[in-house]
Image (spheres, grey):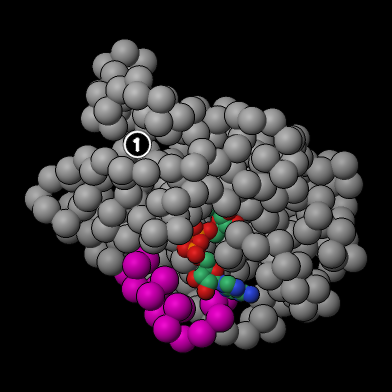
Amino acid sequence: MEISKVGVLGAGLMGHGIAQIAAQAGWDVVVREVDQEHLDRGIGRIEKQLARAVEKGRMEQDDADAVRGRIQGTLDYGDLGDSDLVVEAITEDLGMKLDMWRELDGIVKDGAVLATNTSSLSVIDQAVATKRPNRFIGLHFFNPPQVMPLLEVVQTVTTDEESLKTGFEFGEKLGKLTVHAKDKTGFIVNRLLVPYLLDAIRAYEEGVGSIEQIDAAMKAGANHPMGPFTLLDFVGLDTTKSIADIMFDEYRERRFAAPPTLRKMVSAGFYGRKSGRGFYDYSGEQPQAVDPGL
Ligand SMILES: NC(=O)c1ccc[n+]([C@@H]2O[C@H](COP(=O)([O-])OP(=O)(O)OC[C@H]3O[C@@H](n4cnc5c(N)ncnc54)[C@H](O)[C@@H]3O)[C@@H](O)[C@H]2O)c1
């Protein structure tokens, strides 16, 4: 299916990045937020990244202006009506996503493909809130979407072949490596990554090593670009915990259960980089590992 306009819901961490790369690939993009403050913040992030790309010589000023010109911000669902593909990247909350789809489904034109960027919810649960579950797919981007090369394209039991193909073509035009994933909670990457991150916390709880030792060991011993605690802080401990909780709820297996240290750190507001403290403290020049002492 030919795409000429892309609708994006949410201009947060993921949504602003998805809007930016879609505009960079040449599509007209309309991005919707809940209020002006969130919208301005998201569009501001895009403008900052474009300015940086020009500064570093990665993009011409004219091209950056053209990309910015293709992005329309809105608070009105009605502006997404003529989108050919709509990607939602709103808060990871099934109730909020269902309310949003119920409202949007009657507005977006027939034949458009609807997609969710959910990390942990089942795609089918959102698809059935619309009158077109056959036109519904998962498009799971990675953070930050401007940089991470992978896109998981998720097929549910109701997705038709044309919608799936549209998802793959969209990802390929964005320059992503696309992989097909079934609608199993966590898809491929989180299914493998989340138990690993949780196990790193359990290893720490058991005294296998310190935060720095475990990070250093996984970098040097498994050739990972960053250790599990650095990665946990980057993803966000709150995000990791909610993904783990959803996966545990689905599979009822210990490997997906949030360890007590994670649960308590989230209660304390230690979310990682975004809150200034997680397994590391980010207030100084260099991150310093902090013993959660829990
Ligand atoms: N953060 C990650 O690393 C990551 C990676 C892959 C996928 N995801 C998924 O992407 C989605 C968004 O995550 P995020 O980290 O960008 O969250 P975020 O909190 O940074 O952004 C969510 C944004 O959605 C907005 N929003 C809420 N309801 C809305 C509505 N009805 N219409 C328009 N905007 C609305 C909020 O105001 C907020 O700005 C989630 O489903 C998450 O699972 C996140």
| Quarter of the rendered image showing ligand 1 | bottom right
User: Of all residues shown, which one is farthest toward the top?
Assistant: 221
Q: Is residue 277 left or right of residue 4?
A: left
Residue at x 75% of width, y 41% of height? 250
Residue 98 seen in the current view: yes
Q: Quick check: 240 left or right of 114?
A: left
Q: Considering depth in this image, is 107 or 277 the residue closer to the camera?
A: 277
Q: Residue at x 38, y 75 (%)?
A: 41
In the rendered image, residue 180, in percent from the top left (x then y), is placed at 69, 33
Location of residue 251 (image quadrant): top right
- Tell which of 175 and 145 is nearer to you: 145
Residue 43 belongs to magenta span: yes
Residue in view at x 47 percent, y 66 percent: 12
Q: Is residue 72 above or below residue 161?
A: below
Q: Residue furthest left?
A: 285
Q: Is residue 78 magenta?
A: no
Q: Position of residue 83 (x, y in %)?
A: 68, 69
Q: Quadrant of residue 254?
A: top right
In front here: 227 or 262?
Answer: 262
Q: Which residues are magenta?
A: 25-47
* Residue 179 visible to an observer of this rendering: no
Relative height, residue 86 to residue 106 (above, below): above
State which quarter of the image contains the C terminus.
top left
- The residue at the far front in this view is 294
Pointer 1: what residue? 229
Q: Amino acid at mark 1?
A: Phe
Q: Tell whether 8 sits left or right of 238.
A: right
Element under label 1? Answer: helix
Q: Residue at x 28, y 54 (%)?
A: 277
Residue 149 x/y as whole percent: 46, 38
